[in-house]
Image (tube, grey):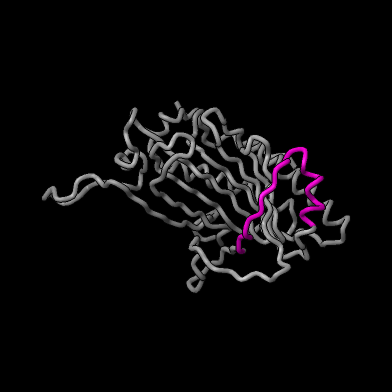
């Protein structure tokens, strides 16, 4: 099921994207670590390297006054001795990463070098779909059950660098974000903030009176870019929610929808000044 870029979606020549993540979460399957070893030969041509990681816990978006807040806080989890861990299947260039555990499949694109250009959402989504098909076939052939999706997630991790040569972008955060200002009292006691961080979440709706189809999370924090150790402002935008049914097709449709929400939110929360820096192409 091919994905096409919406004609009206904002586009940039030089987006500050450092990492993009596509994820589907599903009901637990009866998987053991040996199954990851049996699966790997089907992926090995593209992902010859493997790492073992602790599994990530399931996350669900719920709605209403009594919902439990979604948290990124660290937690201690006790795993059964035979519990499946999370596997990283890593491409030779280390930019492409496929993660697999008993209730989740994740595809990451990561910038590792200055010359690593973001390949855009559509080919990454198509590659992710082909990987899900490979895993589905493996599960069926080994009587391990079906993928029944319960949450989907699209994340864009941006590393916003210097606005001027050598200038720490954390000192110009008010020039980056439309929601930030540096208006203090008239006594001059506070000057510009040295480091700033903030977060917010938004319900994703078709209209003000409709039920939410997902939630958008925005987090801003200071950071250091891995490529050159330069100071950056990190902007992490995640769309997460439940597809309209448990099928993989519905999950892929949700990812397309979530991607649109992330891109539109990125444009909304950043300034026109930065859009010019990043070479916005859909407006003149």
**Residue 255 relative to residue 265: left or right:** right
Q: Looking at the rendering, which quadrant does residue 19 occupy?
A: top right
Residue 282 seen in render: no
Q: Residue at x 51, y 44 (%)?
A: 157
Closer-to-camera residue (227/200): 227
Closer-to-camera residue (213/248): 248
Q: Position of residue 179 (x, y in %)?
A: 35, 47
**Residue 81 relative to residue 175: left or right:** right
Q: Residue at x 29, y 40 (%)?
A: 171
Q: Position of residue 201 (x, y in %)?
A: 46, 57
Residue 89, above or below 72: above
Residue span colored magenta: 35-57
Residue lying furthest left in this view? Answer: 187
Q: Position of residue 191 (x, y in %)?
A: 19, 46
Q: Quadrant of the N terminus?
A: top right
Residue 18 highlighted magenta (yes or no): no
**Residue 45 relative to residue 117: left or right:** right
């Amino acid at each position: 099921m091919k994905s096409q870029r919406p004609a009206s979606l904002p586009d940039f020549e030089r987006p500050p994207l450092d990492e993009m993540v596509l994820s589907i979460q599903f009901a637990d399957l009866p998987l053991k670590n040996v199954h990851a070893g049996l699966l790997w030969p089907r992926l090995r041509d593209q992902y010859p390297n493997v790492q073992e990681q602790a599994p990530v816990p399931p996350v669900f978006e719920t709605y209403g006054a009594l919902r439990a807040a979604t948290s990124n806080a660290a937690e201690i989890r006790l795993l059964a001795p035979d519990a499946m861990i999370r596997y990283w299947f890593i491409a030779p260039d280390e930019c492409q990463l496929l993660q697999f555990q008993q209730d989740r499949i994740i595809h990451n694109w990561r910038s590792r070098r200055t010359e690593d250009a973001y390949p855009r959402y559509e080919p990454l989504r198509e590659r992710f779909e082909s990987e899900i098909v490979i895993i589905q076939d493996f599960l069926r052939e080994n009587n391990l059950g079906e993928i029944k999706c319960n949450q989907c997630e699209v994340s864009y991790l941006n590393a916003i660098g210097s606005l001027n040569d050598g200038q720490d972008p954390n000192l110009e955060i008010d020039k980056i974000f439309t929601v930030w200002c540096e208006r203090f009292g008239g006594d001059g006691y506070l000057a510009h903030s040295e480091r700033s961080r903030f977060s917010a979440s938004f319900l994703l709706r078709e209209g003000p009176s409709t039920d939410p189809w997902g939630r958008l999370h925005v987090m801003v924090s200071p950071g250091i870019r891995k490529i050159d150790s330069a100071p950056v402002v990190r902007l992490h935008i995640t769309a997460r929610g439940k597809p309209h049914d448990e099928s993989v097709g519905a999950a892929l449709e949700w990812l397309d929808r979530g991607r649109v929400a992330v891109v539109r939110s990125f444009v909304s929360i950043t300034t026109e000044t930065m859009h010019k820096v990043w070479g916005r192409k859909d407006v003149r």
